[in-house]
Amino acid sequence: MTTSTGQDADNVAEKVGGLAQWLDERLNLQGALKFAEKKQVPMHKYSVWYYMGGIALMLMVIQFASGVLLMVYYIPGLEAAHASILRLNSQVDFGWFFRSIHSWGANLLIAVLGVHLFSAYFMKAYRKPREFTWYSGLVLMIIALGFGFTGYLLPWDDVSFFATKIGLDIASKMPFVGDQVAVLLRGGHSIGQATLSRFFVIHVALLPLLTIGLMGLHLLFVQLHGMSEPAYFQKLEAAKRTYEKFFPNFLLKDLLVWLLAFNGLAALVTLMPWGLGPEADPFGAAPLGIKPEWYFLAPFQFLKIVPAQIGPIEGELMGALLMILFCSGLVIVPFFDKGDSAEKAKTATYYGLVLLLAIVVFTVWGALS
């Protein structure tokens, strides 16, 4: 005899099965599942770096979600911006928490993207057929820095105001278009309401649209060409190469890493909530030791040691040219190291090591000085 509990369970199972069939007919879920089951992830001593992309994606989702919540209370006006953040921190339930998640998440996102960029570089992920994957990742890194730069001014406190002023002064030193870009971002020759409005629009509209489009392309390229494999792994005999299924094996590990990363972010937010300084005074003196955020410290510190004049060329202009020239290797490397020359591969590796070391040294130097 069938009990009522058993009948209820059968009815629920029937409804769930009907819903799954309805969704499958419209979204081809079975096809997506079969594709995921066929996808394989290489297993080798550098496999841990594959998780960086997933962590970056998770942090990006957190940034979008927390940013939408902050927009409910933020007012992008000179007389109201700082007060709206102060109200969010002190009067809105868990407002301080979500603002800190957004601020700490931005810093962690840039750090994780940097690790992801260089780990992909050293695994030669820029080689054929992954050139577009590499370039889309480079642009996403630049966009993340743009998010950090434009979002830093929005609280309109004294540190963010003067740090933004320094950043725009550095941008103005870029060759050919630096002055025009700085004036366009400021909305004139000084930081004011036009600057705040432009940074707000760029931060909440332009950059998110670019990010969604490029992130979609980046993930598409990863799906088309798979994950890159280190050179030593590619040289192994086919029988000695080890792979695991993306679904469910790697995906479950990825979700565990996401959980650990989110717990780390939550710990930072809880133990060290993001602060808010006094309201910006454009006519006041800059705080002592003012400097840009850590992800812009390397170029800031490099320009500090460049002489004021190098021959007939202004020192800061020459410094900007040298930085552009040095970093352009990241754009050129797919055409230089195609995997057909051991010497070129070593040269590319040495270049990456020097660039990474320079960024770390100048960042630490700038932080300690």
Image (cartoon, rainbow, N blue to C red):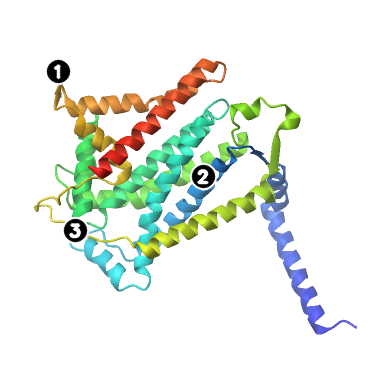
Locate residue 177, reporting x and y percent: 24, 30
Taking the view exactly as shown, the residue that stands out farthest to the right is 1
Q: Work out whether residue 94 can be spotted.
A: yes
Is residue 124 shown left or right of residue 159? right
**Residue 264 versus residue 367 in the image, above or below:** below
Q: Work out whether residue 175 can be spotted.
A: no
Query: In what quadrant of the picture does the C terminus appear?
Result: top left
Q: Do the residues labelled 1 and 3 touch (CB within 8 Å)?
A: no
Q: Quadrant of residue 331?
A: top left
Crowding at label 1, few (<14), some or many (≥20) Cα neighbours within 10 Å? Answer: few
Amino acid beneath label 1: Gly
Query: In what quadrant of the picture does the N terminus appear?
Result: bottom right
Locate residue 250, reporting x and y percent: 64, 48
Q: Mark 2 points at which residue?
A: 52
* Mark found first going from the N terminus, 1 or 3: 3
* Mark found first going from the N terminus, 3 or 2: 2
Identify the disc placed on residue 78: 3
Q: Distance between the residues labelled 1 and 3?
A: 42 Å
- SS for tag 2? helix
The residue sitting at 53% across, 28% down in the picture is 124
Crowding at label 3, few (<14), some or many (≥20) Cα neighbours within 10 Å? Answer: some
Q: Name the residue under label 1.
A: 311
Front-most of residues 135 and 103: 103
Amino acid beneath label 2: Met
Amino acid beneath label 3: Leu
**Residue 267 versus residue 56 in the image, above or below:** below
**Residue 360 versus residue 321 in the image, above or below:** below
